[in-house]
Image (cartoon, rainbow, N blue to C red):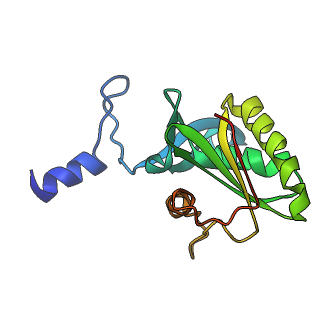
Amino acid sequence: YGQEGEHKDTFCARLVTGDTGETYARTGYLGFLKRTEAIQADGERHDAVFIVGSIDETMLLRGMRYHPIDIEYTVLRCHKRVAEAAAFTWTNLLVIVVELDGPDSEALDLVPAVTSAVLDEHQLIVGVVVVVDQGVVPINSRGEKQRMHLRDGFLADQLDPIYVAYNM
């Protein structure tokens, strides 16, 4: 097989059905093509490619793939005291880690807001909500959340949470 075969498999991939004449690159990222309102030079509407994120980061819940970023944005919008959020799975449960921006006494207010927002927008039941202080969610030098490090800390009981709610 060798390097040449790997190169062809990665950079010259073809669809099995549909337009089999086009070649594509297998990047490992999820994305979609959407027609926009922008007009090209020839007067046609412009198609844009939107990159969602790495397929390795997706979570399989109820037989469907979810990207944690979508769920995290929902959580960030659900309450004014949410400073940061991270989502991952643990034994088929959705776990949301929420950084609290405010007094610890408001930690209980976040749980129903988080669970309701995720249920409304994604039709997912949150199995565990972990409320932590700011700065607990690890972020690398490129600004990417280190969800697996956070998951490891959760499993090793190293997050020092303000409050944990289990919904099992």
User: x, y percentage for residue 163?
Assistant: 76, 55
User: x, y percentage for residue 110?
Assistant: 83, 49
Give the residue displayed 85% in from the left and 64% down from the top. Answer: 101
Residue 102 visible in rendering: no
Q: In the depicted view, which residue is nearer to us: 147 or 133?
A: 133
Q: Residue furthest left?
A: 1
User: x, y percentage for residue 162?
Assistant: 76, 61
Q: In the depicted view, which residue is nearer to us: 45 or 89?
A: 89
Q: Residue furthest bottom?
A: 141
- Lateral position of residue 46 relative to residue 148, left or right: right
* In this view, 53 is above or below 42: below
- Lateral position of residue 23 relative to residue 3, left or right: right
Q: Residue furthest top?
A: 17
* In this view, 61 is above or below 157: above
Give the residue displayed 88% in from the left and 48% down from the top. Answer: 109
The answer to which quarter of the image holds residue 23 is top left
The answer to which quarter of the image holds residue 104 is bottom right
Q: In the depicted view, which residue is nearer to us: 4 or 73?
A: 73
Query: Number of callouts in the render?
Result: 0
Give the residue displayed 61% in from the left and 36% down from the top. Answer: 34
Residue 10 visible in rendering: yes
- Lateral position of residue 160 relative to residue 88, left or right: right
